[in-house]
Image (cartoon, rainbow, N blue to C red):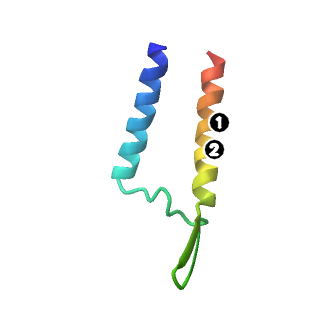
Amino acid sequence: MGKTLIIVGLVIAAVGAVISLGVPLGRLPGDFTYRRGDFSFYFPLTTSILVSVVLTLVAWFWGRR
C-alpha cells in the first residue's frame, strides 16, 4: 500500500509539473469546442486519448513487476 501511494503521488506531481511548464493539457488540437449564444459544449477528445494511453502504459508496467 505504501508503494502505491508513493507512485500515485509521483504521478500527480509529474502531471502538475507538466501543466506548470505550459503544456496546454485540455486545450490540445483535436479537443472540440462548440459555442452558440449562451450555450457552450467542450469535448476533450485528444486529451482523453492521451490520458488513456498514459494510464494504459502505467498499468502495463505495473502489471509486469
Judge by depth and name the residue closer to the eye, 22 or 31.
31
Position of residue 32 in the picture relative to residue 25 (left or right): right
Q: Is residue 46 left or right of residue 14?
A: right
- Please determine whether, in this image, residue 17 is positioned above or below residue 35: above
Amino acid carrying mark 2 in the image:
Ser
Residue 33 image position (x, y, % from top left): 57, 72
Amino acid on which the number 1 mark rests in the picture: Thr
Secondary element at tag 1: helix
Q: Position of residue 62 (x, y in %)?
A: 60, 23
Q: Residues within 10 Å of mark 2 (few under 14, many from 20)?
A: few
Residue 48, position as x, y percentages in the image: 61, 52
| Image position of 32 with respect to 8: above or below | below
* Mark 2 lies on residue: 52
Question: What residue occupies the far left of the structure in this picture?
Answer: 20
Count neighbours of disc 1 (C-alpha within 10 A) and say few if under 14, some if 14 to 19, many if 20 or more.
Answer: few
- Identified at 61% across, 25% down, the residue is 61
* The quadrant where residue 40 appears: bottom right
Check if mark 1's residue and mark 2's residue have beta carbons within 8 Å. Answer: yes
Which labelled disc corresponds to residue 56?
1
Q: Quadrant of residue 6?
A: top left
The residue lying furthest to the bottom in this view is 37
Left-right relation of 7 to 20: right
Q: Quadrant of the C terminus?
A: top right
Residue appearing at x 61%, y 58% in the figure = 46
Q: Which mark is residue 8?
A: none
